[in-house]
Amino acid sequence: MQLVGLVHDIGKIMFLWGSREEGQESGADGQQWSLGGDTFVVGCQIPDSVVFPQFNDLNPDMANPKLNTAHGMYEEHCGLDALKFAWGHDE
């Protein structure tokens, strides 16, 4: 399974050396606009680096003042074990 994950992500590494002619350009208007950013911590403010950040405001958690801050429901320096994540298709 680890080999499948590695092969899957080699495309993301190759993307760094690509060019527009090869269909490997980044940015919101590039052909690879959704390459990453689908895993993030939940229970706090959603970062603008996620795919389709313009829809962050539609998440009901963003109407909750406790969850719409940098630390949200977590204590500062709580450690990775205490965090909850929204996982994407890679995980």
Image (cartoon, rainbow, N blue to C red):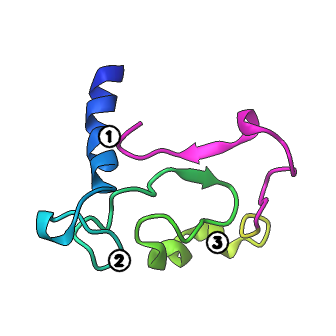
- Specify whether 41 is left or right of 88: right
- Packing grade of label 3 (10 A; few <14, some 14-19, many >=20) is some
Amino acid type assigned to the residue bearing label 3 in the image: Met
- Give whichever of discs 1 and 3 has the lower sequence position: 1
Instruction: Relative to 46, say whether 83 is above or below.
Output: above
Question: Could you say which disc has been placed on residue 9 in the image?
Answer: 1
The span shown in magenta is 70-91
Identity of the residue drawn at 32% across and 40% down: 9
Instruction: Relative to 63, say whether 72 is above or below.
Output: above
Q: Position of residue 82 (x, y in %)?
A: 75, 37
- Give whichever of discs 1 and 2 has the lower sequence position: 1
- Give whichever of discs 3 and 2 has the lower sequence position: 2
Marks 1,3: beta carbons within 8 A = no
- Packing grade of label 1 (10 A; few <14, some 14-19, many >=20) is few
Give the Cα separation between the discs numbered 3 and 2.
23 Å
Amino acid type assigned to the residue bearing label 2 in the image: Ala
Q: Residue furthest right?
A: 76
SS for tag 1? helix
SS for tag 3? helix
Identity of the residue drawn at 67% across and 75% down: 63
Give the Cα separation between the discs numbered 1 and 2.
20 Å
Identity of the residue drawn at 55% across and 71% down: 48
Marks 3,2: beta carbons within 8 A = no
Give the Cα separation between the discs numbered 1 and 3.
31 Å
Q: Position of residue 3 (x, y in %)?
A: 30, 22
Quarter of the rendering occupied by the C terminus: top left
User: According to the image, label 2 marks what residue?
Assistant: 28
- Specify whether 61 is left or right of 53: right
